Amino acid sequence: MAFESLSEKLQNALSKLKGKGKLNEKDVDLAMREVKLALLEADVNFKVVKNFINDVKKRAVGSEVMNSLTPGQQVVKIVNDELTKLMGERESKINFSSSPPTIILMCGLQGAGKTTTAAKLSMSFKKQNRRPLLVACDIYRPAAIKQLEVVGEKAQVPVFSMGDKINPVDIAKAALEHGKKNGNDVIIIDTAGRLHIDEDLMAELENIKNVLNPEEVLLVVDSMTGQDAVNVAETFDEKLGITGVILTKLDGDARGGAALSIRAVTNKPIKFVAMGEKLEDLEPFHPDRMASRILGMGDVLTLIEKA
Amino acid sequence: EKTRKGMAEKIDSILKSYGKIDNGLFDELEEILVTSDVGINTTMDIIERLKTKVKENKVTEAIEVKELLKNEIKDILNEKEKDRELNIEPSPAIVLVVGVNGVGKTTTIGKLAYNLREEGKRVLIAAGDTFRAAAIEQLGEWSKRAGVDMIAHQENSDPAAVIFDGIQAAKARKTDVLICDTAGRLHNKKNLMNELNKIFRVVEREYGDARREVLLVVDATTGQNALIQAKEFQEVCNISGIVLTKLDGTAKGGVVIALQTELNVPVKLIGVGEGIEDLQKFNTDDFVDAIFD
Ligand SMILES: Nc1nc2c(ncn2[C@@H]2O[C@H](COP(=O)(O)OP(=O)(O)OP(=O)(O)O)[C@@H](O)[C@H]2O)c(=O)[nH]1
Ligand SMILES: Nc1nc2c(ncn2[C@@H]2O[C@H](COP(=O)(O)OP(=O)(O)OP(=O)(O)O)[C@@H](O)[C@H]2O)c(=O)[nH]1
Ligand SMILES: [Mg+2]
Ligand SMILES: [Mg+2]
């Protein structure tokens, strides 16, 4: 990449400090300007960046510039630690109901990756010897049901559908009955993509939620999302009470600042990341990796750890 | 709607409360641009130019600055005003639609096929996405809605072969516009980008004399990654226009401002919904007004 990395920039900004003393407010301000630009370039929401920078400033002022590290790296470490903390310390798993079936409701904007991710989840459950069922509640998008059927077959997971003439709320109800009768212990509901400001479709989701009382309501978010991620996440959470987030398309090179934005406004954990179009491409979320990705650092951290 | 109105009121009240111009005002304007996904670098450039203009024109009231800023952005976008028409006249023409996963390529093709057919053109579409589950069925449904024929092979067949057949069919049927769908692909995947390259070689060889329009579809919700996307696609397939989709949401799509300056490729069409009539010509004034309203 042609860009100078954040740690290089910080290194330059703080070069005079090398190996001595503590960071004073002026040094920190200088460094934070670079951090702020990096976070904005990574699509972290403007307001989230502001708050984050203020928090980090407080911690950084007065902290020792360790001898083994150059000051720039010290600041990177502080920023990275705080970011990781904010993103949730550990990976967060699916909550299974104590009285199965466990119901998982997928939701999100158009094209985020709900249908693909639903199939990926179902396949991972199957590998855990569970008996998942996929449910086709997207009656709007052309060939959405067919798509779910195709990926369901690949995952070797049954798909419950009633065509596109029945109301999604009724489909959800019938699917629950069907699942109980057939001994399915996890039921995953695929829903149509919708805008958070589409009142009718958001009401439909609320109704589905009310009849199913799902264990998990997972918001699927495209990692390329920009500043609007906060509006989307906030509204979905307000209306539905999401229980977690799945970040898709991380096999791309987007820095994924949306992860931080969403975490900051909803305080809900990121449960999985999707890393490709194939059904195996679903991984648990690692807050530390996400933090260095957003900061655009990669290997620098491993260097710091070794130092 | 609520969100948009809230934003407009907020800006105007900010401007009123300022009265005279100071640095805080420029910070507020910077925030508006950044939160519209204009990107921090482009935003800082624009704000710098705005500051110069404010000095040059001896503007002293905050409320006038907003108009100056709007004009600044409109100037950037209008550099390409003449090229906004699709390059499809005279017939025959081929339109290739490319982009990363899930941005709205297939839907845009449905809408575009419908619009062109309504204009009285003979339109054919080719199902060049043989990879995604039910992509062919999805495009098939759109071809029905738009009332145009579709050339398709089986799932997992060679996309270049589908485009080849599409071209032969277009020639035989004296089609005015052949529109080709392609699978969503991330620009950082070498093998998938090479596959696109192969499609373009077929077009070059078989339909070199046809007008060519290569549309990159960009989701308005996308942040700064759109810049890298556009550059990488540009390298492989010489994009000639951008379609900005999902503008019916709350995202402003500000990244296209940087796109247009850096790549010199105009935004030609916008998607404003999932219905067949929800495709419009890009209009600079409306777009810029929406950032501030
Ligand atoms: N590269 C990549 N592509 C993905 C990933 N997840 C999903 N996709 C692709 O993104 C596109 C959209 O995925 P879908 O699963 O159809 O998304 P959706 O949210 O169900 O879309 P709608 O139902 O239309 O709202 C498809 O081309 C998928 O193959 C991922 O992790 N990486
Ligand atoms: N709200 C809104 N949704 C749109 C618009 N354009 C497309 N969509 C929706 O976005 C989702 C993805 O659209 P597709 O046309 O399948 O996107 P694609 O780029 O062909 O996706 P892949 O082939 O999987 O890469 C669908 O749910 C569409 O209905 C738009 O302008 N506004
Ligand atoms: Mg879907
Ligand atoms: Mg498609």
Image (tube, rainbow, N blue to C red):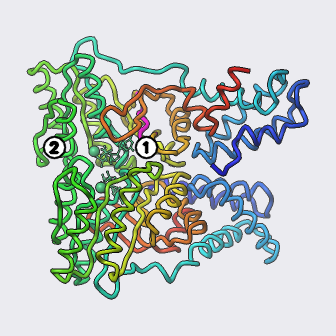
**Nearer to the camera, A195 or A9:** A9
In the image, residue A302 above or below residue A162: above
Q: How far is the residue under mark 1 from the one under mark 2? A: 27 Å
Query: From this viewpoint, is residue B29 visible?
Result: no
Residue A123: which quarter of the image?
top left
Question: Regarding mark 2 in the picture, which secondary structure is present there?
Answer: loop
Kind of residue at badge 1: Asp
Q: Residue at the spot x=34%, y=41% of the render?
A: A277
Which numbered disc covers residue A167? 2
Kind of residue at badge 2: Asn
Q: Which mark's residue is nearer the viewer, 1 or 2?
A: 1
Q: Residue furthest bottom?
A: B90
Q: Quadrant of the C terminus of chain A?
A: top right
* Place of residue B119 in the rendered image (x, y in percent of width and height, measured from the top left): 26, 82
The reply to whether the magenta stretch includes residue B238 is no
In the image, residue B271 above or below residue A56: below
Q: Residue at the spot x=24%, y=68% of the render?
A: B164
In the image, residue A161 above or below residue B162: above
Q: Residue at the spot x=31%, y=69% of the render?
A: B202
- Name the subunit of mark 2: A
> What residue does disc 1 label?
A222
- For the record, the magenta segment spans A244-250
Which numbered disc covers residue A100? none
Q: Residue furthest top?
A: A98
Q: Residue at the spot x=55%, y=20% of the render?
A: A89
